Image (tube, grey):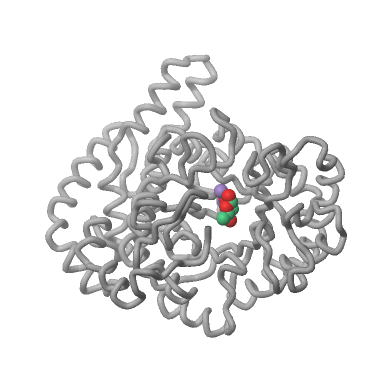
């Protein structure tokens, strides 16, 4: 990770211009009664978790092209996230995926992370791949599902695995478990929708019973893939039913790529928040399906509207949810993609903070659709990047994190250290 001195050196050349830009934007916002300072303060307090499975290169079923220097261990993944956070000052945590991450010495790993200013966000279980240690040395398989499997022995090991992930999370200081299941049906007639749902509900409630106090559990829906005809937890409605069946500490996690085309995700967010079952996000962007593209690169307006709904739910402040990035970096340097995604999340958040919510409510009350749109567009079209950069600078990060990353030579350094052939665990 970059030292404060290195960051200061990078910032030195950019500080004067940034101050001018912030000043200019502040006065233009003030003219319409909005405050740059409060936006900067809110941004400075915001952090989005980095996924441990996305600091290596992603692949498709057609191929995978390792970038070089991919982390070989969870410690090296933490090093990458610490590097990212030293630049962005907004990625203070890592979300682990088990067994892709399976530390021998959890206490040592926790210390390693703490030393680098990183904490552990939600833990992710994995019952979408067979894992000899959890599937009884290969005798049992998740080929036909995990919590939904017709074989009780398989369902039991899947529950057991989730409990072990919680136990590991407790040792690391995490406070939540995210359950994304691949369970579903590939061929009509293969299994019964209702029976599968009931099995999953029962399994989730057994996992829920294992949650320590202060813990949360998130159900993450996805319409298809790897099951191509039906997925048990396929939409927010099923996710809500499953969270309700699991218990009071369960809520729904919205992965932005896990919706059928044209789904109104901001409305999904509104509904889940309304019933107090919105748990968190996996940020990414999507053109067709679970594309895991750079957040904000395809539908930035949607991202902005999602943040508007979040601020609506939190009455002007961001609710305390699990905010994570979940992406697959197939051709870009993963750290560069995470820098861009973090910037996009912060930009959308800042723009949403600029919405005059009282004026919007007034316009809605008199059915002034034109004015309602003006208010949203006015905020969305504001170039808030100086505020985001200023928040980063005040948090000890780089004014221009992408340039800072490129100038640092980090990738070349880790290729030297880890080799050009290393392949991180993940998909
Ligand atoms: C899934 C889903 C999960 C993630 C896996 C790797 O599509 O998004 O959140 O853990 O991919
Ligand atoms: Mn996800
Ligand atoms: Mn996904």
| Residue at 36% in and 64% down | 84
- The image shows residue 325 at horizontal and vertical percentages of 48, 53
Judging depth in this view, the residue of 217 and 356 nearest the camera is 217
Residue 408, above or below 248:
below
Q: Is residue 321 visible?
A: no
Judging depth in this view, the residue of 231 and 216 nearest the camera is 231
- The image shows residue 182 at horizontal and vertical percentages of 68, 50
| Residue at 64% in and 40% down | 224
Residue 78, above or below 319:
below
- Indicate left or right for 415 with 263 as reference: left
Quarter of the image for the N terminus: give it.
bottom left
Residue 282, above or below 28:
below
Residue 355, above or below 153:
above
Q: Which residue reaches farthest front?
A: 62
- Indicate left or right for 290 with 340 as reference: right
| Picture quadrant of residue 416 | bottom left
- The image shows residue 62 at horizontal and vertical percentages of 48, 49
- The image shows residue 291 at horizontal and vertical percentages of 49, 43
| Residue at 46% in and 41% down | 285
| Residue at 52% in and 62% down | 426
Judging depth in this view, the residue of 350 and 96 nearest the camera is 96
């Amino acid at each position: 990770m970059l030292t404060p001195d290195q960051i200061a050196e990078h910032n030195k050349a950019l500080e004067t211009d940034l101050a001018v830009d912030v000043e200019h934007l502040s006065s233009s916002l003030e003219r319409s009664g909005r405050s740059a300072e409060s936006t900067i303060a809110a941004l400075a307090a915001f952090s989005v978790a980095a996924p441990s499975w996305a600091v290596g290169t992603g692949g498709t079923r057609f191929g995978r092209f390792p970038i070089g220097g991919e982390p070989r261990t969870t410690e090296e993944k933490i090093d990458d996230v610490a590097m990212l956070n030293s630049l962005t000052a907004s990625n203070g945590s890592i979300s682990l995926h088990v067994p892709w991450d399976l530390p021998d010495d959890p206490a040592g790993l926790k210390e390693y992370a703490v030393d680098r200013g990183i904490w552990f966000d939600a833990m992710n279980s994995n019952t979408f791949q067979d894992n000899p240690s959890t599937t009884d040395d290969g005798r049992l398989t998740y080929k036909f599902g995990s919590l939904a499997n017709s074989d009780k022995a398989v369902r039991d090991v899947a529950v057991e695995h989730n409990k072990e992930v919680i136990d590991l999370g407790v040792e690391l200081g995490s406070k939540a478990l995210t359950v994304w299941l691949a369970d579903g049906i590939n061929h009509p007639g293969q299994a019964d929708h209702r029976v599968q749902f009931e099995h999953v509900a029962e399994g989730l409630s057994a996992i829920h019973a294992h949650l320590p106090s202060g813990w949360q559990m998130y159900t993450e829906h996805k319409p298809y893939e790897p099951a191509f005809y039906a997925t048990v937890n396929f939409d927010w409605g099923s996710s809500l039913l499953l969270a309700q069946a699991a218990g009071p500490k369960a809520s729904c996690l919205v992965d932005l790529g896990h919706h059928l085309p044209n789904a109104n995700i901001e409305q999904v967010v509104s509904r889940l928040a309304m019933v107090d079952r919105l748990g968190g996000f996996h940020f990414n962007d999507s053109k067709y399906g679970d594309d895991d593209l750079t957040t904000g690169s395809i539908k930035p307006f949607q991202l902005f509207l999602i943040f508007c709904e979040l601020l609506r739910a939190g009455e002007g402040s961001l609710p305390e949810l699990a905010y994570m990035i979940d992406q697959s970096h197939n051709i870009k340097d993963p750290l560069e993609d995470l820098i861009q995604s973090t910037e996009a999340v912060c930009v959308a958040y800042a723009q949403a903070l600029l919405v005059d919510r009282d004026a919007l409510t007034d316009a809605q009350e008199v059915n002034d659709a034109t004015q309602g749109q003006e208010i949203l567009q006015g905020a969305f079209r504001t170039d808030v990047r100086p505020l985001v950069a200023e928040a980063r600078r005040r948090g000890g990060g780089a004014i221009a994190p992408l340039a800072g990353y490129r100038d640092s030579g980090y990738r070349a350094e880790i290729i030297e250290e880890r080799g050009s052939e290393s392949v991180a665990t993940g998909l």
